Amino acid sequence: MNHQVSGTLCPGYCLKENEMKKLSITSRIIIAVATLALCVLFVTPAWSIYLVAPQYPEGLSMQIWLNKITGQVEIINGLNHYIGMKHINESMFPEFRFMVYLLGAYILFGLVVAITGSRKLLMVYIIMAVVAAIAALVDFYMWGYDYGHDLDPTAAIQVPGLSYQPPLIGHKKLLNFDSYSYPDIGGWVMVAATAVFFLIWFIEWRKSKKIIK
């Protein structure tokens, strides 16, 4: 009798269990599209820093990519030289040597999530994105701290007790310059894609709860 009940209930229960574990086809397609959108980071900057001052009303900009720095870097270096700041160059960012490969691996993993439809892998994927974002911000803060505090003691302009650490995110006044720091195109795409991944996970999680009921 127990065998008969088990045989009767198991197909329906197993179906529900499988539905809970797998993402819907629509969700998997959206994940694949959002993941492939991250390829934008290969061809656009991830972060930007802007400087505006009375003598530069049009502003000076510096863009940080996965593997390089562009913008008016030499002009910024020339100005920073007077207050003893280090010369900005790509050797200051050892991460440039492997960031492209890390992003490539992350994109491949995202496609695996889309193909398998695993809700657990999707959560791992989201956690990886959050951890990577936190690590990038911490790394950028540490670079900015060193860049703004480790000054040349023989610099032409010296203000005792004053440091020139650029803002991590947002605005900061540095002498007569207004400094702005925020994500560029690639960075915003990464933020949007991660938000999409989390939204899909939440929707699928809610759906699984309804299936259980």
Image (tube, rainbow, N blue to C red):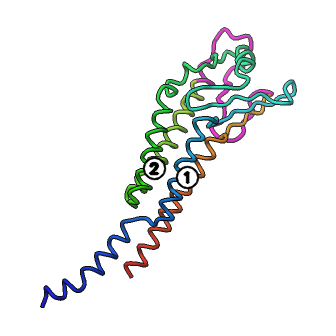
Q: Position of residue 163 (x, y in %)?
A: 66, 25
Q: Which residue is mark 1?
A: 34
Dot 1 crowding, Cα within 10 Å, few <14, some 14–19, many 20+: many
Closer to the chain start, of discs 1 and 2, is 1
Q: Is residue 55 left or right of residue 152?
A: right
Q: Is residue 40 above or below residue 155?
A: below
Closer to the camera in the image, 206 or 139: 206
Q: Which element type, helix, strand or loop, lies under badge 2?
A: helix
Q: Is residue 14 above or below residue 54?
A: below
Q: What number is the disc on residue 102?
A: none
Residue 13 picture quarter:
bottom left
Q: Which segment is the magenta one?
A: 147-176
Q: Is residue 94 left or right of residue 153?
A: left
Closer to the camera in the image, 168 or 96: 96
Q: Main secondary structure of the magenta part?
A: loop
At 66% from the left edge and 8% from the top edge, which residue is drawn? 154
Q: Amino acid at mark 1?
A: Ala
Q: Position of residue 34 (x, y in %)?
A: 55, 52
Magenta stretch holds residue 154: yes
Q: Position of residue 95 (x, y in %)?
A: 50, 28
Please say if the residues under marks 1 and 2 sit with CB atoms less than 8 Å apart.
yes
Real-space Cα separation, disc 1 to disc 2, in angstroms: 9 Å
Q: Which residue is mark 2?
A: 110
Q: Residue furthest top?
A: 154
Q: Is residue 123 above or below residue 9?
A: above
At 69% from the left edge and 33% from the top edge, which residue is drawn? 49
